[in-house]
């Protein structure tokens, strides 16, 4: 007599094990870069907190200090340093994984990029004009109009910055004369 087939540990025949479906997140280079950016932001925040703790700590210059307060601050400092080292290890892993993912990618030749033109219309570098993109007359006119508007706005911003710079200079000069 043959034994019934075993379908699971302690499960009745025909019953399926109830396991939560495992979600597989595909980790691409862009999400790795986002994770790396968050790690860098956390590193900066933790470093600022460490400097804040250090600034608030009293120096042992003969002044009596409360050992409880000192031990508490020292514990916080050590915890921040431990978390900082964890964040640096995480950042190193992200960096290595990004380098691994990008190892097979080829660099885009600069000839395929959009050429840069100076304000006088001359091309920035001395490459052949065959690599330039060709636009229709309507597109070219629209681009030139947008370019002119941007130049005007840039000029206006430059004038405002110059006026602010002069105003700050005058205020500083008046404050210096008052002292």
Image (cartoon, rainbow, N blue to C red):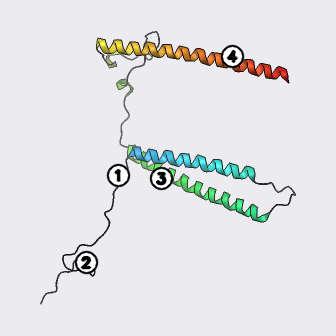
Q: Secondary structure at mark 1?
A: loop
For label 2, count other residues whose C-alpha is less than 10 Å away and answer few (under 14), some (14-19) or many (20+).
few
Query: Sequence-wise, which precedes: disc 3 or disc 1?
Result: 1
Nearer to us of marks 3 and 1 is: 1
Q: CA distance from mark 3 to mark 4?
A: 49 Å
Tag 4–tag 2 contact (CB < 8 Å):
no
Residue tagged 1 = 26
Query: Sequence-wise, which precedes: disc 3 or disc 2?
Result: 2
Tag 3–tag 2 contact (CB < 8 Å):
no
Tag 2–tag 1 contact (CB < 8 Å):
no
Nearer to us of marks 4 and 1 is: 4
Residue tagged 2 = 8
Query: Sequence-wise, which precedes: disc 4 or disc 2?
Result: 2
Query: Sequence-wise, which precedes: disc 4 or disc 1?
Result: 1
Nearer to us of marks 4 and 2 is: 4
Q: Residue at x 31, y 63 (%)?
A: 21
Q: Residue at x 50, y 51 (%)?
A: 92
Q: Secondary structure at mark 4?
A: helix
Tag 4–tag 1 contact (CB < 8 Å):
no
């Amino acid at each position: 007599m043959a034994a019934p087939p075993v379908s699971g540990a302690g499960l009745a025949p025909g019953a399926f094990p109830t396991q939560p479906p495992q979600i597989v997140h595909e980790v691409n280079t862009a999400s790795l870069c986002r994770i790396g950016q968050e790690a860098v932001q956390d590193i900066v925040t933790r470093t600022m907190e460490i400097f804040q703790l250090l600034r608030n700590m009293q120096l042992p210059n003969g002044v009596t200090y409360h050992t409880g307060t000192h031990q508490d601050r020292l514990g916080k400092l050590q915890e921040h340093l431990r978390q900082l080292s964890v964040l640096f290890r995480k950042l190193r892993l992200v960096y290595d994984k990004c380098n691994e993912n990008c190892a097979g990618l080829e660099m885009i030749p600069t000839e395929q990029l959009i050429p840069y033109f100076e304000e006088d219309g001359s091309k920035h570098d001395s490459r052949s004009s065959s690599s330039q993109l060709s636009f229709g007359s309507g597109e070219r006119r629209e681009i030139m109009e947008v370019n002119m508007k941007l130049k005007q706005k840039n000029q206006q911003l430059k004038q405002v910055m110059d006026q602010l710079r002069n105003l700050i200079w005058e205020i500083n000069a008046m404050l210096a004369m008052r002292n």
